[in-house]
Image (spheres, rainbow, N blue to C red):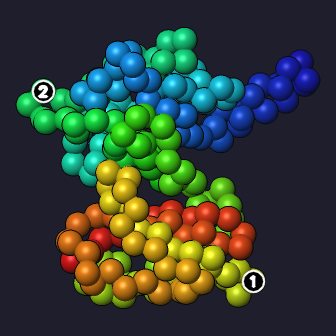
Amino acid sequence: MKKLTIIAILVFCGFANAQITCPTDIKTSGQSTPPSPIFTVPNGQNGCNESWPTSITVNGSLTYNYVSCSGGNLKYEIETGQTPPADYEMTIDFGGGVVCSYNSTGGANTLSLKNEELKLDFKIAPNPTSGVLNVELDHLNEINSLDVYSVSGRKVYTVKENNEINISHLSSGVYILRADTKKGVLNTKIIKK
């Protein structure tokens, strides 16, 4: 009985700590459309058994609702009355810090890792800003590059080996800042005033 209780606790803890990861791509070639994307679910713990969110945000403003997940195919549909993107180039917020970006053919761009998985100290200030963002890391880490992406997943600006980035030339709105550091990649939403 004691062994069964311990196993049950371990299984529960494993499920409690399971985290959604980005689907590997959006199925194209007639299998889905931008209004009804079908994602390829990663194998393993995050398959169709994962608790996918009931709604997701696409390109910062569009709401897509969960339809189904079976056989590794995760399907969402855009809410009625909204205009979908022209192609599969989209950035999707699955919530909980999981932001996924896809190119126009449905292939995944590497934008998202949950920062807490890397156990890195990471601070950006000020956010929102109309000009310069400062990125602070722990003293044992260094910035390789800072990349700014639009909500549609397009890279709009890059700086190398610098802890600050001037975004004064960008239009007002929400962006994703990707910090490639010596210890790993960090991502966060930033707001340009």
Image point 55% across, 86% down: which residue?
A: 162
* Of 51 and 25, the residue lying toward us: 25
Left/right of residue 27 with respect to residue 66 in the rendered view: right
Check the image and report above or below for 133 versus 78: below
* Of 148 and 135, the residue lying toward us: 148
Residue of label 2: 80
Left/right of residue 166 with respect to residue 136 in the rendered view: left
Check the image and report above or below for 193 versus 73: below
- Residue 140's label in the rendered image is 1
Mark closer to the chain start, 1 or 2? 2
- In percent of width and height, residue 11 lies at 75, 28
Kind of residue at badge 1: Leu
Q: Can residue 86 be spotted in the picture?
A: yes
Instruction: Determine whether label 1 and label 2 are within 8 Å by CB.
Output: no
- In percent of width and height, residue 25 lies at 49, 32
* Of 174 and 126, the residue lying toward us: 174
Image quarter where the C terminus lies is bottom left
- In percent of width and height, residue 124 lies at 46, 79
Image point 37% across, 56% down: which residue?
A: 154
